[in-house]
Image (spheres, coloured by chain):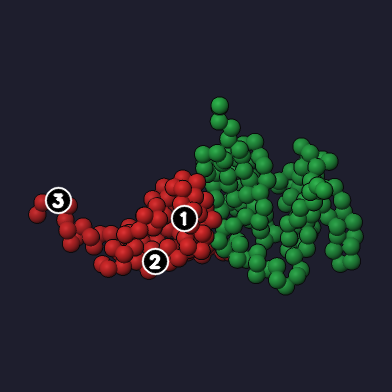
Amino acid sequence: MKINLSSVLVDDQEKALRFYTEALGFQKKHDIPLGPYRWLTVVSPEDPDGTELVLEPDEHPAVKPFKAALVEDGIPFTSFAVTDVAAEHKRLEALGVRFTQPPTDFGTVITAVFDDTCGNLIQIAQEIRKPC
Amino acid sequence: MDDICHAIADATRRAILDELVQRDGQTLFELCGRLTMKHGISSSRQAISQHLDVLESAGLVIARREGRYKFHWFNGEPLKAITQRWPTKGR
């Protein structure tokens, strides 16, 4: 068994595709019409055969209150790995991305949290390797 | 006076104020992360939320909504009552 997919629940798939590709820099992998929606996935250009992120419609009535409650408390829905949180923060802020938490050093990890414009907060995290 | 003294009589609540003085305007998520990672406080998010309620009713924390997010801010004003009552300098 292996993990090949992960989902974010988005309020608008087209808007999500733009944000996740144009702002975050992921690449579209699958885009298959599926009733009123699409089977829409993106991958990291650093790992094009790796785990796909499904940009999944948030149409179930339970999802919106769930997302709103997470966002209110500043809780990210998921987290992506980056090599330089400070550089990503600077780059994304210049693109108008709203951060609810600027880069913060927790000793073993530096994290920041931003709004994906589709109803989610997303964390970026950089592991800090300490010399042995 | 009672509510201020009660609010700052708890180490976790003092740590919350310390972290807000370090960086004002934090979400509950960020505060919980800082308390866990920097202070070794393992309280649940719900417990931290209740500590924030106590600090808020004492006026030491102000929670403000900005759009869909809620941020917490430090407010030192109520602490003036303490030094007014017991001045730190000679009269």
Q: Residue at x 55, y 44 (%)?
A: A103
Residue type marked 1: Gly
Name the outermost residue toward the front: A1
Q: Is residue B6 above or below residue A132?
A: below
For disc 3, the chain is B
Q: Are marks 1 and 2 on the same chain?
A: yes
For disc 2, the chain is B
Query: What residue is pinned by disc 1?
Result: B25
**Secondary structure beneath label 3:** loop
Q: Which chain is green?
A: A
Q: Colour in which chain B is shown?
A: red
Badge 1 or badge 2: first in the primary sequence: 1
Do callouts 1 and 2 mark residues in contact (Cβ within 8 Å)? no
Q: Is residue B4 above or below residue B87?
A: below
Query: Residue A90's quadrant in the figure?
Result: top right
C-alpha distance separating marks 1 and 2: 17 Å
Query: What residue is pinned by disc 3?
Result: B89
